[in-house]
Image (tube, rainbow, N blue to C red):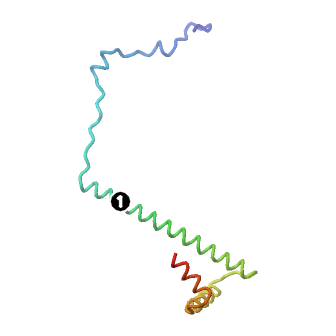
Amino acid sequence: MDHGNEAAVSLAEETPRPDATASRETPHEKPKRRRKTIDQQIAEAEQRLRKLKQQARNEERKARTHRLVTSAATIEAEAGRVELDETIARWLGRMLAAELAKPDSEIARHVGARLAR
């Protein structure tokens, strides 16, 4: 290990090693776990439930937003050079509602078939 410098000492030589008796004298004890009270467990479960409900709401909101954007993009693509605005969207909604009121219309049959799935 001598590389021309006699002052260099390996790290293993400097570090004292504990002997077997030292490890028997000081056993490593695990810290005792404190049991949670029933009230604490209920509070944690309620918190988890709130988080899960919030997550479900966020997923539903994301899916709805995606559906609305996709639907609007499809309408604009089918209509040609028309950009949807609130007036056109309301008019389309009224027209759709009128068609859905006719049980033998193509759109009413389509919606009925989707609901039957």
Whether 105 is drawn above or below 66: the answer is below
Q: Residue at x 75, y 81 (%)?
A: 80
Left or right of 1, for residue 49:
left
Residue 18 placed where, x, y %?
A: 36, 16
Counting the numbered discs, the total is: 1
Whether 106 is drawn above or below 35: the answer is below
Q: Residue at x 38, y 63 (%)?
A: 50
Residue 32 placed where, x, y %?
A: 26, 38
Among the 4 quarters of the image, the one containing residue 33 = top left
Q: Residue at x 48, y 15 (%)?
A: 12
Whether 22 is drawn above or below 59: the answer is above
For mark 1, give the secondary structure: helix
Q: Residue at x 30, y 28 (%)?
A: 28
Q: 110 or 64: which is nearer to us?
A: 110
Residue 65 placed where, x, y %?
A: 57, 71
The residue beneath circle 1 is 47
Among the 4 quarters of the image, the one containing residue 106 = bottom right
Q: Quadrant of the N terminus?
A: top right
Left or right of 32, for residue 9:
right
Whether 73 is drawn above or below 94: the answer is above
Residue 92 placed where, x, y %?
A: 63, 87
Among the 4 quarters of the image, the one containing residue 73 = bottom right
Neighbor class of circle 1 (other Cα within 10 Å; few <14, some 14-19, many 20+) is few
- The residue type indicated by label 1 comes to Gln
